[in-house]
């Protein structure tokens, strides 16, 4: 199919043009490869005026006289050419750009175009010495595009390509071009990979890893490249464990390097166009599993000494929108009541904290699903992790060197008359300012951050990295609920009584085998600390597993089945003394105030005054958790006992 056949006329959009008496130049060689027609363009929007100084108009034409993506070019000698109006070509990705445009270099600097103009209409020199305009959709048929095209003719003395203009659907692509992050070399490299037969093999290998991870409920894929070794490794995060898988355990280093180079071509939102093993990069790529379900990989690379380490978080985009309830996640009844109380209080912030992979986003999604349908909910996420039918979800794409997209999105959101706003994570000065702006505005704000305790959340928000004022945090009604949660592996039904360890011995939390005497002493310590008869009430995992837990395929997970939330919650907004401690940055005082009691009943489901570790101990008492799985996520029971003895001596 020829180029003119591809750019077929759109019904009802042909625009009359007076015939030109001037001499026509032969059409330039087409530099766009054939592609499927993209359909009718969107209606022409209002045309914003450029702020740059523009040349005097060569001619004035009405909107009906402009062509949609081919233009009569007026040169220094008055020669021109034109073709019939046609549907505009669309560049939707960097792969499109590499395949369809024979790119030499951007001409924005040659023409002294301001970034405000070049980021909307960017002239590009092609390899046949013609020029094409890459335009955002709303600027394809604009005055700005006309003026840039005339500048090309007047200053460059080069003909326009046929077609003279194409649509770039992704603004970040134009920004990357004018900043020279995308250039002839990067596009050439991408083009070679796209047509290489090795690409299919490498992408197939990544899809195999992804299929395995999805089947076994893996949270992450880890690719660790060792540059000086012949073999490198692929690992997975499954059930909170960092495990190796037979077919991926030892793979040729060169193969993994090539896989990363090829697969990164599909990554969006990265600051660089190609994979750079010597620098940190992040982005996301979309994939479809064999069963048709969509997943997203969230990439984070680390330029380690031995070689690049890449972590890909697996996000399932087609999960059941109903999701799990708070009870199914592991929250106790009293904690659910605190959640409902916070949701029913207008204004202020609910902040969920935890380490990476602690299930914060899952719990936040469960909370949002519980908001009544008569409230308008908007989310700002990086990226969207769970589908929320009752929310208007927005993915924020962060690109280095480009004006912060969060700020622009937030401006629009504040005019959207929402009741509830979800910010995926408070992590920097920009999101910190947004927190202060919204938490006191009457909007219910829900967000997450990374800390190790609920009482550390104010300190995290007030840090230099985020910059929220302590006076603001200590205001009534701002911090209405602070939550810290962790995920602990839950015991399978094939679990043993604790007596099994006393009788048979077993591995401690570090994998070292211990005899019966050690475990009897271990049980006595739990009894002293928490008033729990471990030998009678506590269960431990079956190291041999059963037909249910063996299906996961890892000995490390035998005897375990899924994970449960253990959490601690505080409500500073309704407690003047707690707010004063926050204002004074008395973190130790805040810890003692909320979690300093020693007369607690650890066999009660009432979590008031109890830490997340205390919550885990209660679940161990109920036979849900192995105490050996609690220690690595909090602290050793021996450490708890030593700390209590120090506190007693200090009081004495």
Image: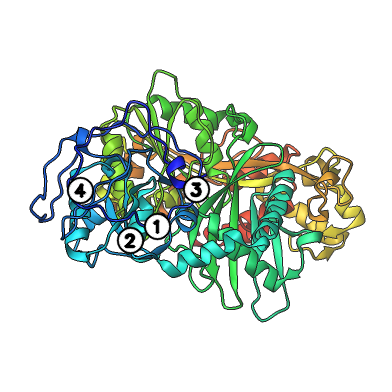
Looking at the picture, how far across and down is residue 450, in whole percent? 47, 53
**In front: label 2 or label 4:** 2
Closest to the camera, between mark 3 and mark 1, is: 1
Q: Position of residue 231 (x, y in %)?
A: 73, 74
The label number, if any, that marks residue 480 in the structure image: none
- CA distance separating discs 1 and 4: 22 Å
N-term-proximal mark, 2 vs 3:
3
CA separation, marks 2 and 3?
Answer: 18 Å
* Vertical comparison of 475 with 201: above or below: above
Q: Residues within 10 Å of mark 4 (few under 14, many from 20)?
A: many
Label 3 environment density (alpha carbons within 10 Å; few <14, some 14–19, many ≥20): some
Where is residue 125? Give x, y as percent.
Answer: 33, 63
* For marks 3 and 1 on the same chain, the one whose residue lies earlier in the sequence: 1
Image-quadrant location for residue 640: bottom right
Q: Say what secondary structure mark 4 lies in.
A: helix
Residues marked 2 and 3 touching at CB (< 8 Å): no
The label nearer to you, 1 versus 2, is 1
Q: Compared to 136, does 303 lie above or below?
A: below
Q: In the image, is residue 404 above or below residue 330?
A: below
Q: CA distance from mark 1 to mark 2?
A: 8 Å
Question: Horizontally, is 425 left or right of 329 in the view?
Answer: left
In the rendered image, is residue 346 in sight?
yes
Question: Is 640 positioned to the left or the right of 574 in the image?
Answer: right
Disc with the residue nearer the chain's start (1 vs 4): 1
* Residue that badge 2 annotates: 130
- Marks 2 & 4, CB-CB < 8 Å contact: no
- How far is mark 2 from mark 4, CA to CA? 16 Å
- Residue where numbered disc 3 is placed: 34
Residue at the image position 46 percent from the left and 64 percent from the top: 187
């Amino acid at each position: 199919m020829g180029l003119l056949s591809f750019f077929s006329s759109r019904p009802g959009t042909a625009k009359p043009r007076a015939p030109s008496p001037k001499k026509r130049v032969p059409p330039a060689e087409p530099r766009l490869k054939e592609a499927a027609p993209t359909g009718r363009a969107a209606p022409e929007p209002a045309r914003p005026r450029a702020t740059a100084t523009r040349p005097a108009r060569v001619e004035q034409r009405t909107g009906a006289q402009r062509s949609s993506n081919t233009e009569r070019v007026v040169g220094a000698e008055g020669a021109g050419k034109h073709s019939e109006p046609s549907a505009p070509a669309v560049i939707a990705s960097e792969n499109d750009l590499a395949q369809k445009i024979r790119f030499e270099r951007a001409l924005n600097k040659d023409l002294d175009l301001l970034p405000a103009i070049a980021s909307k209409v960017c002239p590009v020199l092609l390899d046949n010495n013609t020029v094409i305009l890459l335009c955002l959709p709303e600027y394809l048929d604009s005055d700005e595009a006309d003026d840039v095209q005339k500048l090309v003719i007047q200053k460059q003395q080069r003909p326009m390509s046929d077609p003279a203009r194409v649509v770039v659907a992704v603004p970040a692509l134009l920004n990357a071009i004018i900043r020279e992050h995308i250039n002839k070399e990067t596009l050439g490299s991408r083009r070679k990979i796209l047509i290489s037969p090795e690409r299919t093999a490498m992408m197939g290998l990544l899809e195999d890893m992804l299929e395995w991870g999805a089947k076994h409920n893996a949270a992450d894929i880890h690719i660790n490249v060792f540059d000086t070794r012949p073999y490198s490794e692929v690992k997975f995060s499954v059930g909170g464990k960092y495990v190796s898988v037979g077919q991926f355990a030892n793979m040729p280093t060169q193969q993994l390097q090539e896989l990363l180079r090829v697969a990164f071509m599909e990554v969006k939102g990265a600051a660089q166009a190609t994979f750079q093993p010597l620098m940190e990069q992040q982005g996301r790529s979309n994939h479809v599993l064999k069963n048709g379900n969509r997943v997203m990989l969230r990439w984070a690379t680390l330029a380690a000494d031995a070689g690049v380490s890449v972590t890909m978080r697996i996000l399932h985009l087609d999960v059941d929108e109903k999701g799990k309830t708070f009870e199914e996640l592991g929250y106790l009844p009293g904690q659910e009541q605190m959640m409902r109380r916070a949701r029913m209080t207008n204004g202020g912030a609910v902040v969920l904290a935890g380490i990476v992979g602690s299930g914060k986003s899952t719990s936040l999604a469960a909370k949002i699903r519980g908001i009544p349908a008569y409230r308008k909910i908007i989310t700002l996420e990086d990226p969207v992790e769970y589908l929320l039918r009752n929310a208007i979800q927005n993915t924020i794409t962060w690109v280095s060197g480009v004006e912060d997209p969060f700020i622009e999105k937030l401006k629009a959101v504040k005019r959207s008359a929402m009741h509830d706003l979800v910010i995926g994570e408070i992590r920097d000065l920009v999101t910190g300012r947004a927190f202060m702006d919204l938490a006191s505005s009457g909007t219910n704000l829900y967000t997450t951050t990374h800390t190790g305790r609920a009482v550390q959340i104010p300190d995290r928000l007030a840090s230099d990295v985020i910059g929220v004022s302590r006076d603001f945090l200590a205001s009534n009604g701002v911090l209405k609920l602070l939550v810290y949660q962790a995920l602990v592996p839950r015991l399978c039904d094939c679990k043993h009584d604790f007596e099994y360890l006393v009788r048979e011995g077993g591995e401690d939390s570090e994998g070292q085998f211990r005899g019966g005497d050690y475990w009897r002493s271990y049980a006595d310590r739990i009894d002293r600390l928490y008033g729990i008869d471990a030998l009678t009430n506590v269960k431990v995992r079956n190291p041999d597993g059963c037909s249910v837990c063996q299906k996961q395929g890892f000995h490390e997970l035998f005897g375990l089945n899924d994970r449960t939330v253990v959490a601690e919650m505080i409500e500073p907004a309704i407690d003047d003394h707690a707010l004063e401690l926050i204002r004074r940055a008395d973190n130790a005082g805040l810890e003692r105030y909320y979690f300093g009691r020693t007369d607690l009943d650890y066999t009660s489901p009432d979590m008031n005054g109890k830490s997340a570790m205390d919550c885990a101990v209660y679940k161990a008492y109920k036979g849900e958790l192995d105490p050996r799985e609690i220690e690595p996520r909090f602290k050793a029971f021996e450490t708890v006992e030593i700390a209590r003895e120090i506190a007693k001596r200090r009081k004495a």
